[in-house]
């Protein structure tokens, strides 16, 4: 990759542009919609609510520049926009393994349709790819040049191979049809508006800690992940979208601070002050043992680096779940009321 906006002070500056965000009612998508609107863009949020929720975007609905369309990206979409962010795809292992065929269809057919749209409109398109393209990585930390270690027939394959095929399609549309592409490989991202039941480690541990349930540590808890706060990630998306046409990625975005799942459990226990204790559960199949992004390219090309430390981001996320859970009726209350 060459070019980029190295050294430039980045500004939002999207006024008058119409931006399509697929998966816009999801966790990351809703934050992206919010940031784009704050920058003056008109936003078309497309979602089929498979894992996303109306509550994630409810606060944006009154904005006349915000439009929502219920639509499944595996079907063609004819509309007029100036930029596309393609985020539609379930992201948590529990959700993407629930209907694995649909997961692959969403990644592959969704990519074809959104690339077809970008090709017709001659507009740039950003793809939310994933660190899962590296599988259970044999190289550590993972640079973009690493081709990965992926099981093509396992329970994670619908997601990993779907996302890999989507990357292939993005680069072929770029080479064959000169579509302007921006491919970002996202490493574990967390923050407010994660789905409380999506089974991801950060939401699981926090919800368990806040509701007094045991904290479920899979395996010995020695596997590692590197957690990026959602605001940092969205900032990276916007910077990448604003780069020159020749900047395509793939580019890693994530926080290189690496933690074992045991350390994460300890931190959640400390920050919530919970009495919940850790219980060990079996490690799921093909669970990557380690994951840490090499973000040298993002630093050089985008002048980007994560700002929010895990302790601070977890604090904000705990506060979100605390509010969310205090609004939801407890089962005991419902039983009492209906008695
Ligand atoms: P999410 O599940 O909260 O959001 C995904 C959104 O896509 C949801 O609103 C869902 O309803 C929508 N969707 C799913 N299938 C669809 C379809 N066929 N048509 C239209 N909409 C559909 O997950 P997220 O964490 O916000 O992830 C957003 C994107 O980022 C995904 O593409 C995911 O693969 C990628 N990503 C996320 C992470 C992470 O740690 N959160 C890591 C790597 C990659
Ligand atoms: N497509 C879409 N919106 C558009 C243009 C295309 O959804 O504005 C879909 C189209 O239905 C097709 C896919 O994108 O299935 C790929 O389009 P492309 O032009 O690459 O392929 P073709 O139409 O030639 O098969
Ligand atoms: N994990 C865990 N307890 C949970 C949920 C997940 O120990 O309740 C572990 C999981 O085995 C994995 C890590 O936490 O090693 C991250 O899992 P997550 O599903 O959040 O993301 P991914 O595996 O896709 O990185």
Image (cartoon, rainbow, N blue to C red):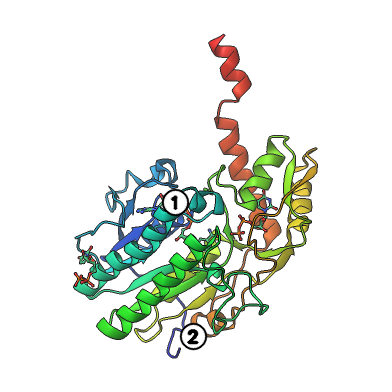
Q: Which mark is residue 6?
A: 2
Residue 41 shows up from this direction: no
- Expressed as whole percent of the image width and height from the top left, the position of residue 305 reads 58, 74
Q: Residues within 10 Å of mark 2 (few under 14, many from 20)?
A: some
Q: Residue 174, position in %: x, y?
A: 32, 81
Q: Is residue 93 visible?
A: yes
| Residue 277 relative to residue 257: left or right | right
Q: Nearer the viewer, residue 82 or 111?
A: 111
Which residue does the numbered mark 1 point to in the structure image? Answer: 26
Q: What is the x, y in percent for residue 136?
A: 63, 70
Picture layout, residue 73 above or below residue 226 = above
Residue 309 against residue 123 in the figure, above or below: above
User: Secondary structure beneath disc 2?
Assistant: loop
Choose between 274 and 23: the one closer to the eye. Answer: 23
Q: Is mark 2 within 8 Å of ligand 1?
A: no
Tell me what residue is drawn at x 56 percent, y 26 percent.
329
Query: Does the beta carbon of the residue at mark 1 sit less than 8 Å from ligand 1?
Result: yes
Residue that extends furthest to the bottom in the rendered view of this protein: 2
Q: Residue at x 78, y 42 (%)?
A: 273
The answer to whether residue 301 is above or below residue 195 is below
Outermost residue on the front side: it is 153
Give the mark, 1 or 2, whose residue is nearer the N terminus: 2
Asked which quadrant contains residue 308, the reply is bottom right
> Does 76 sit above or below residue 68?
below
């Amino acid at each position: 990759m060459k070019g980029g906006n190295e050294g430039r002070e980045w500004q939002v500056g999207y006024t008058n542009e119409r931006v399509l965000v697929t998966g816009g009612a999801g966790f990351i998508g809703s934050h992206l919609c919010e940031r784009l609107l704050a920058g003056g863009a008109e936003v078309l949020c497309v979602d089929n609510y498979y894992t996303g929720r109306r509550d994630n975007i409810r606060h944006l609905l009154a904005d006349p520049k915000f439009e929502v369309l219920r639509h499944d990206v595996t079907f063609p979409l004819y509309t007029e926009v100036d930029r596309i962010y393609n985020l539609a795809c379930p992201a948590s292992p529990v959700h993407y393994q629930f209907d694995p065929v649909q997961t692959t269809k969403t990644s592959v057919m969704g990519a074809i349709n959104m690339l077809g749209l970008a090709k017709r409109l001659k507009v740039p398109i950003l793809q939310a790819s994933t660190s899962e393209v590296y599988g259970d990585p044999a190289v550590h930390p993972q640079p973009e040049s690493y081709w990965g270690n992926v099981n093509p027939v396992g329970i994670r394959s619908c997601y990993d191979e779907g996302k890999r095929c989507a990357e292939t399609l993005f680069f072929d549309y770029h080479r064959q049809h000169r579509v302007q592409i921006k491919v970002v490989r996202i490493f574990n991202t967390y923050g407010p508006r994660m789905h409380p039941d999506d089974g991801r480690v950060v939401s699981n541990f926090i919800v368990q800690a806040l509701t007094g349930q045991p904290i479920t540590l899979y395996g010995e808890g020695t596997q590692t992940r590197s957690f990026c706060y959602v605001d940092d990630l969205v900032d990276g998306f916007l910077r990448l979208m604003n780069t020159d046409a020749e900047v395509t990625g793939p580019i890693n975005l994530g926080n290189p601070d690496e933690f074992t799942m045991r350390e994460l459990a300890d931190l959640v226990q400390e920050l919530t002050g919970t009495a919940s204790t850790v219980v060990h559960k079996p490690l799921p199949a093909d669970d990557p043992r380690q994951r840490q992004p090499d973000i040298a390219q993002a630093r050089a090309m985008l002048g980007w680096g994560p700002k929010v430390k895990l302790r601070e981001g977890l604090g904000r996320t705990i506060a979100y779940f605390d509010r969310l859970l205090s609004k939801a009726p407890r089962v005991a209350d419902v039983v009492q009321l209906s008695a």
